[in-house]
Image (spheres, helix red, strand yellow):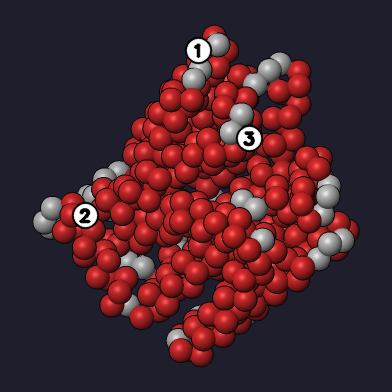
Amino acid sequence: MPSEPRSLNPFRVLVRHRNFRLFWTGQTLSLIGTWMQSMAQGWLALQLSDSAFVVGLVTATGSLPVLLFSLHAGALVDRTHKLRLIMIMQSLMLVEATLLWWFTWSGNITVPWLLVLAASNGVFSAFEIPARQALLVELVGREDLQDAIALNSSGFNLARIVGPSLAAAVIAGAGLAWCFAVNAASYLTVLVGLFLVRLPPWSPTPAVGTPMEGVKEGLRYMRSTRLVWALMRLVTVFAVLGIPYLTLMPVVARDLLRTGAAGYGVLLAFVGVGGLAGALFLASVGQRFRRGKLLLTSSVSFALLLLVFSVTRSVGLARVLLLGAGFTMILNSALSNGALQSIVPDAFRGRLMSAYSFVVVGLSQVVGAFAAGGVARAVGVQWAIGGAAAIMLTYTAWAFRRDPELAAL
């Protein structure tokens, strides 16, 4: 009997899986709050210090704990109840957002307090992100895992479009502090959804050795599994060289495109719309393409789009290029994530996702952003973005030739 044709509905996985529907809805609402807090936190840092360096320092302070602790967090994720760990971390994030609201609303906020709260949120994220990524397979199963990852990316990009716009309205109407209050309230939506999730009883995996030995075991697995190692190298190159173009966008908007702050917001919106379209495309028809071919196409296209973007001085063309960059960037990241999760045994899932978080959140924000800023300062922002794009393009050609397993995915 022929198999039933796969539905083109990008939200099919939400209809099929109640647990994922609860998780995705709460997570997307929470991400809107997170984007609101991120925008308001940067603005608050600028108000308190009148220093671009302090603004960057606050951002780096929030990402540094992910770089420092995520690998150790992965060993914990593989040894503990993932859903419970996520609920604990989300509760702590709620407390952090509430404290940030109170300090700001009461007029007691200072730069040191802002750094402490940003670092605290980074520590919680170091544990929450790999646990959340590793939980997906328990919510939807392996068959729908790629679609679930793509739909997660759609929620992230929807939040990236809605969050900053909503933050601007809240700041204008109620004041900066209330962005943090909205974010605190958004964590409640996640916790309610997670509380309603029903999973089979958790069976702990027997742990052998210390957590540090668990970290080393996870790294050995990644290094000795050829396809996993090839994918992790590709993820690292694109995270460190590709994602930081977003960090440089204010400079592009002001110095190259002459658009001002309003134009900067529009440029980011085009990235978000492209990313949302890419995620929905992958969730609806991505399974009809060979993953390796789609990964190669998206990797080459993303690098080429950034290369052209780095030399354009037309605002209209820049918007179109950013639309495509957002689309192909999400395809590249979601396909890589899905391929990694489809390969890894459950016993190593938390550690692999912690390494993924280490690269995508930690290295890209701490190393990639600082390096891009340094190159931009030395030789110009167009060379920072264009040079990184040229390296990504060269690496993609080399990687797919060296590791044919990538193309055969």
Q: Which residue is mark 2?
A: 205
- Local packing at callout 2 (Cα closer than 10 Å; few below 14, some 14-19, many 20+) is few
Report whether 398 appears left or right of 46.
left
Residue 112 vs residue 322, the one in the foreground: 112
Which residue is rendered at x = 42% and y = 77% of the image? 230
The kind of residue on which mark 3 rests is: Met
The answer to whether residue 138 shows anywhere in this view is: no
Q: How far is mark 3 from mark 2, CA to CA? A: 40 Å
The kind of residue on which mark 1 rests is: Asn
Of mark 1 and mark 2, the one earlier in the sequence is 1
Q: Quadrant of residue 37?
A: top right
Report whether 201 appears left or right of 103.
left
Q: Which residue is mark 1?
A: 108
User: Farthest residue in the left direction?
Assistant: 209
The percent coordinates of residue 143 (x first, y second) are 50, 66
- Residue 325 position (above or below residue 100): below
The percent coordinates of residue 191 (x first, y second) are 47, 31
Q: Are marks 1 and 2 in contact (CB under 8 Å)?
A: no
Q: Quadrant of the N terminus?
A: bottom right
Q: Which residue is mark 3?
A: 39
Which residue is rendered at x = 24% and y = 70% of the image? 220
